[in-house]
Image (cartoon, helix red, strand yellow):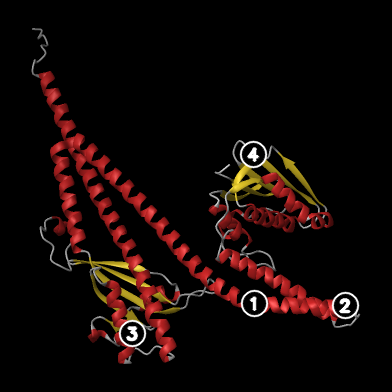
Amino acid sequence: MVRLFRPDPAHPFQIARFLSFSSFVLILGTALILVIFISNYAREVFFKKNTNFALLLAENLNHQIFQRFTLPTVLGFGRIELKEPAQYQRLDQVIKSTIHSFHVLEVRIYNKEGEVSYATKGNLLGKKLLSKQDITKTVKFRKHFFVLEKKVSNIKAMFTLNFPPQSVILKTVYPLKAERTFGLKREPIMGILEFKQDISKDFETIVYFQWLIIVLFICSFLVLYLLLRGIINRAEVLLLERLREKEKLETALHKTEKLASMGRMVSAIAHEIRNPLGIIQSTSEFLYKKFEKENDSKAKFLKAIFEEATRLGRTVSDFLDYARPKDPRQEEVDLKKLINKVFSFLEQELKSKQIDIYFEGKSFICIGDNDLLYRVFYNLILNSIQAIGKKGWIKVIFKSFENTVVIQDTGPGFEDKMIEKYLEPFFTTKEQGTGLGLAIVQNILEMHGAKFSLQNHSQGGEVRIHFKRC
C-alpha cells in the first residue's frame, strides 16, 4: 500500500517558533556579551579617568612641595632636614592644604633608599615600605605607576549594594622632582611621592551603571541595546573632547604663565642694563672719533667697544620689544611700499651676498601699525638673507584675493619637527642671536589679528602671513 505524504499544518509554525526562539537566544546572547564588553570598557574608562586625575594631583603636589617647601627651606636653613620639627610641620601644612577635598587618605614621601621621610601617619617614619623594583622604577627610570587595591572581587562587587569606605583605593607612586632647570638638564629626583585615594563611591557608581545596562539590555533586547550603545558612544566622545579641550587649555595656561614670568624678568633686567649701556655706547663713540682724528692706536679698541655696545643695545631693545609690546596704531599700510623700504635699507647686504629680489602678484593695503609691520618684514627678510648665506633669491608673493603675503627664499628651509620650536622665545639656531626675532614677529602679527606660519617650498623656506583687516 502506497502511503501518501501529507504536510503537517503545525510544521510551519514550529519552524517559525524555532526561528523566533533561536533569534531570541541569539539576540539575548549577543546582548549579554555586549553588556559584559561595555561594562569592562566602562571600568577601563573609569580607571583611566581616575589615573589621569591622580597624575594631575601628583604633578600639582610635586610643584607645591618644590615651590612652597623645598626652595624656601633651602634658602632659609641651607638644607632639608625633616627631622627638624619646623621643617616637618611646614611640609605637612603644604601637603595637607594641597590635597584638601581630593579624597586623599594618606600621603608618604620616601627617600631614594625607600625609607619613609614623611607620612600623614607618623608611625611609619623611618620604615622601608617600598620594594627595590618600585624604587628602581621611580628613581632610576623616572616612571610613575598606579596600583588599584580592592577589598572586594569584581563578581562580588556586582552584588554589593553599598560599598563601605575604602573598599577601592587607588595608589599613585610618582618620582618627586626638582623644578626650574629651564631644560638645561634633567630634573633631579628628590625622592618618591606616594598617596592613596578612596575611589569607592566612583567604583560604586560604575557598578550601578553596569547593572542599569544589564537590565536595559535584557528587557529591551536589540532596540534598547542600540540606543544605549549610541548614548554611551556619544558620552565617551564628549568626555574625550572635553579632556582634549582641558589638556589644550592647561597647556596654553602653563605656556602663558611661563612666558609672562619670563617677560617680567627680561623686562626688569633689560631696563637695568639699558641706561649704563647707553653711557658706555655714547662715551666710547665720542672717544673713538676723537682718537681716530688723532690717529691714536687706541681708536681700534674703542671702536670694538662701541660696536659691541651697539650690538648689545639692539639685543636689549629686542628683549624690551618682546616683554613690553606696544599697542598697534590703526592706519592704512601699503605692504609693497613697506617691503621695498626694507629691501632699500638692506640693499648693501643683498648686493654683497649676491641675493636677487623678486615680486609676484598685486599688492594690497592692510590696516595696522606701519612701524610694527616694518619690524615684522625686516626680521623675516633678514632671516632669509642669513639663511641663504650667499647667492640665491628672495621672492615676495602678494595674494590679494586671500589677503596673504608669502616670502620664499633659497635657504635650507625649516625642519618639520622643529616648526613649533622656531617660534619659542630664546630658541635660536644661530651662534649669535637672542632667539626673539620670530617670537616678536608672532606677537606683532597676533596684535594685528594676522595668522603666521612657517613651512617649506621646493627650493627652500617659506613664510605665510594672512591679514584679516584689509
Report the quarter where the N terminus lies: top left
Mark 2, residue position:
292
User: Real-space Cα distance between discs 2 and 4?
Assistant: 51 Å
Question: In terms of sequence position, does the residue under pointer 3 or pointer 2 come before the other?
Answer: 3
Residue kind at label 4, given as amino acid type: Lys
Tell me the mark number nearer the camera, choosing from 2 and 4.
2
Q: Position of residue 310 (x, y in %)?
A: 73, 71
Mark 1, residue position:
275
Q: Is residue 276 above or below residue 209?
A: below
Residue kind at label 3, given as amino acid type: Glu
Verify CB contact (< 8 Å) between mark 1 and mark 4.
no
Residue kind at label 1, given as amino acid type: Asn
Q: Position of residue 97 (x, y in %)?
A: 28, 75
User: Real-space Cα distance between discs 1 and 3?
Assistant: 54 Å
Mark 3, residue position:
115
- The secondary structure type at the circle numbered 4 is strand
- The secondary structure type at the circle numbered 1 is helix
Q: Position of residue 92 (x, y in %)?
A: 29, 82
Question: In terms of sequence position, does the residue under pointer 1 or pointer 4 come before the other?
Answer: 1
Tell me the mark number nearer the camera, choosing from 1 and 4.
1
| Total numbered circles | 4
Verify CB contact (< 8 Å) between mark 2 and mark 4.
no
Question: In terms of sequence position, does the residue under pointer 4 or pointer 3 come before the other?
Answer: 3
Mark 4, residue position:
399
Q: Which residue is depicted at the point 20% across and 59% down? A: 203
In the picture provided, is 385 more to the left or to the right than 229? right
User: Real-space Cα distance between discs 1 and 4?
Assistant: 44 Å
Residue kind at label 2, given as amino acid type: Glu
Q: Which residue is depicted at the point 38% across and 84% down? A: 113
User: Real-space Cα distance between discs 1 and 2?
Assistant: 26 Å
User: Real-space Cα distance between discs 4 and 3?
Assistant: 67 Å
